[in-house]
């Protein structure tokens, strides 16, 4: 039993995501140093760490926004280290951005429709969708799922911050995601919106794994089964939420040490 | 304006759902119909000079400027090689078809020469685009300008195909079904039909997945990549489409003047296209045609006007330059943008917030 779990967690074709020795330099600054990380399919994990710890950089390396300086990244067994971002996305990887990256001039529905097109061969289609178009229907369903049906026809520029964060999540759910990276999805949300977010995360189909970067422990520890702690571009602790919370070193560095 | 929503808003369902912010203005507005009818009955109103020299020529330049509007307005890519692509299509029409230069022209029938010319020019534009998409902003302008000026010098120096600085003269125009398609009225309708086709295609495409994605690429290429789009492939496809439109304009151009020479593809002409697109406005397809009409009117009439007040007629460029400056300073989205803002102000009382960007 244990050995099977161990084998799966060590990697090979069994891992959803497998990073080995990933380093990312920005000039002289090492934003990530020798990060090795394995996440099982369907696993939900939090990445915690103080400002500038390298969490977002970790996501950028995984999606290919900024490829790593060295190291390898495997996605469901396939070496994607040198793949452009769109190739990774088409294989089922998704992400959200810490600072919403939406299309403010388009409506809510068109933003989601665009995301649905991106992971479909229809992305090059010169034909406008018809009323029974499956992608439009998929977009409608996603808009509904993130509680934005009431503002579906509004331009994104007119939305409140919390609604934009929800839309960001809808974009990451388009198509058939297998693994999602959420970068501080709860930042700036009201308590009600946080509860809705937790609902969305906990009701995702169980085969969809994710990594969530979240400063709010109430959100983070409720929606994950494992936690990775980062500091100065390195991973320094991994374990289940309960262990992390009670770990004195973590308390010292992160929970106690006031993180803005 | 929402594409996805348009699809949903077919018969009956509209009541329960909120309409999108922008009204359907592309085809519903009475002014649009008035202009369309006017263009169709133009041969009844205008004589040969106005019909071809003013309206025909404006429509042709408008088609070439439309290809730039598509790239710049929807794709955020300012290409200065659109006239060069048109010029290559024109040259190929003359070289593959029949002309007074029998030593050069192959004498193919028009129905073979024309599609071939368009295909070659589209290929050329697509290759140029493939080079240009690796760059951004000012570098895109530089690389396409380099292509334009290289082509100009090449046509000047190449005698085997382009006949050097004399160019190709007395180009034979289509003549079939007993109609001389270069006769004023027939030719006007040919131009109008092609212009309408291009205008319709660009307007339609803007709200299909391909066009929507192109606007996404313009606004946030990095996000588009993490939505699964191959940003460069999208941009190259946009160049291919725009090249095809420019090529259509180029074929009409060579039929219009019945000759083509390096002067027709000079850098100055390439910049005229940029001026037309910017003056008209790159946020909507119609801007290209508005800009072209203004340009042609100025070019045609300021000459007489300037001569009348004792100045060199060639200074019409000075006037156009000043107009260009004024537009860039006061209305970055051109005459069309200015018009929309005026309409927005006059209609302020009503719920509409005027002048939203095209979806
Ligand atoms: N594009 C970049 N260019 C230069 N330096 C960068 C870049 N992106 C990140 N960095 C640097 O890398 C380090 C890690 O940044 P990163 O954004 O990954 O931190 P983070 O853990 O996400 O922090 P936060 O909690 O503030 O979001 C920081 O010192 C940051 O300044
Ligand atoms: Mg961050």
Image (cartoon, coloured by chain):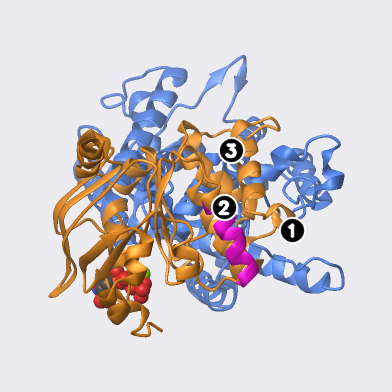
**Residue at the spot of label 2:** A200
Give the chain of mark 3.
B
Height in image: A159 above or below B126?
below
The residue carrying mark 1 is B21
C-beta proximity under 8 Å, tags 1 and 3: no
Q: In this view, does B207 lie above or below B359?
A: above
For mark 3, does the 10 Å Cα neighbourhood hold few (<14), some (14 to 19), or many (20 or more) residues? some
Q: Is residue A246 left or right of residue A158?
A: left
Taking the view exactly as shown, the residue that stands out farthest to the top is B177
The x and y percentages for residue B145 are: 31, 57
> Is residue A193 part of the magenta span, yes or no?
yes
Tell whether label 2 touches label 3 (CB within 8 Å).
no
Q: Quadrant of residue A86?
A: top left
**Which shade is chain A?**
orange
| Chain corresponding to blue in the figure | B
State the extent of the magenta-drawn residues as a range: A190-201
Of residue A230 and residue A176, the one placed in the foreground of this image is A230
Residue drawn where x is 83% and y is 69% of the image:
B347
Other residues around mark 2 within 10 Å, as few (<14) / some (14–19) / many (≥20):
some
Secondary structure, magenta segment, majority class: helix
């Amino acid at each position: 039993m244990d050995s099977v779990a161990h084998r799966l967690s060590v990697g090979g074709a069994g891992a959803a995501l497998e990073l080995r020795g990933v380093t990312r330099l920005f000039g002289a600054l090492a934003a990530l140093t020798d990060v090795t990380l394995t996440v099982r399919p369907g696993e939900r994990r939090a990445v915690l760490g103080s400002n500038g710890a390298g969490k977002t950089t970790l996501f950028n390396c995984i999606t290919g926004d900024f490829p790593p300086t060295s190291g390898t990244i495997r996605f469901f067994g396939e070496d994607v280290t040198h793949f452009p971002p769109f190739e990774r996305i088409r294989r089922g990887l998704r992400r959200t951005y810490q600072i919403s990256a939406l299309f403010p001039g388009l409506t809510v529905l068109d933003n989601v429709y665009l995301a649905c097109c991106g992971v479909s061969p229809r992305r090059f289609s010169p034909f406008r969708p018809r009323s029974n178009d499956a992608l439009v229907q998929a977009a409608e369903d996603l808009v509904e799922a993130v509680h934005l049906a009431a503002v579906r026809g509004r331009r994104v520029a007119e939305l409140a911050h919390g609604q934009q964060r929800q839309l960001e999540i809808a974009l990451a759910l388009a198509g058939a995601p297998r693994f999602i990276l959420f970068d501080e999805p709860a930042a700036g949300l009201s308590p009600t919106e946080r509860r809705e977010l937790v609902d969305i995360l906990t009701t995702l189909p169980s085969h969809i794994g994710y990594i969530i970067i979240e400063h709010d422990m109430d959100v983070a520890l409720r929606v994950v089964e494992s936690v990775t702690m980062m500091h100065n571009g390195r991973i320094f602790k991994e374990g289940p939420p309960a262990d992390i919370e009670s770990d004195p070193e973590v308390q010292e560095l992160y929970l106690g040490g006031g993180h803005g | 304006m929402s594409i996805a929503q348009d699809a949903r808003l077919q018969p009956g369902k509209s009541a329960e759902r909120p309409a999108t912010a922008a009204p359907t203005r592309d085809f519903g507005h009475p002014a649009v119909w008035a202009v369309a009818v006017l263009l169709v009955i133009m041969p009844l109103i205008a004589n040969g000079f106005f019909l071809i020299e003013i309206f025909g020529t404006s429509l042709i330049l408008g088609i070439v400027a439309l290809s730039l509007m598509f790239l710049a307005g929807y794709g955020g890519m300012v290409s200065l090689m659109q006239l060069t692509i048109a010029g290559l299509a024109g040259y190929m029409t003359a070289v593959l078809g029949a002309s007074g230069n029998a030593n050069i022209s192959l004498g193919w029938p028009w129905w073979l020469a024309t599609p071939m010319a368009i295909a070659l020019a589209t290929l050329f534009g697509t290759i140029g685009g493939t080079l240009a998409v690796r760059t951004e902003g000012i570098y895109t302008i530089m690389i396409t300008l380099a292509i334009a000026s290289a082509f100009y010098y090449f046509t000047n120096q190449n005698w085997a195909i382009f006949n050097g600085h004399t160019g190709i003269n007395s180009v034979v125009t289509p003549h079939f079904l007993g109609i001389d398609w270069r006769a004023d009225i027939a030719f006007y309708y040919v131009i109008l039909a092609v212009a309408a086709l291009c205008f319709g295609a660009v307007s339609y495409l803007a709200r299909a997945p391909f066009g929507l994605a192109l606007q996404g690429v313009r606004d946030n290429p990095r996000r588009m990549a993490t939505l699964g789009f191959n940003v460069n492939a999208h941009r190259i496809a946009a160049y291919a489409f725009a090249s095809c439109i420019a090529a259509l304009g180029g074929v009409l151009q060579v039929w219009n003047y019945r000759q083509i020479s390096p002067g027709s593809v000079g850098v100055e002409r390439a910049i005229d296209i940029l001026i037309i697109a910017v003056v008209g406005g790159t946020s909507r397809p119609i801007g290209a045609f508005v800009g072209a009409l203004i340009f042609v009117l100025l070019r045609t009439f300021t000459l007489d006007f300037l001569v009348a007040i004792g100045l060199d007629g060639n200074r019409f460029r000075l006037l156009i330059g000043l107009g260009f400056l004024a537009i860039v300073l006061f209305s970055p989205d051109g005459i069309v943008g200015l018009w929309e803002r005026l309409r927005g102000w006059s209609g302020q009382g009503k719920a509409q917030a005027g002048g939203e960007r095209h979806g």
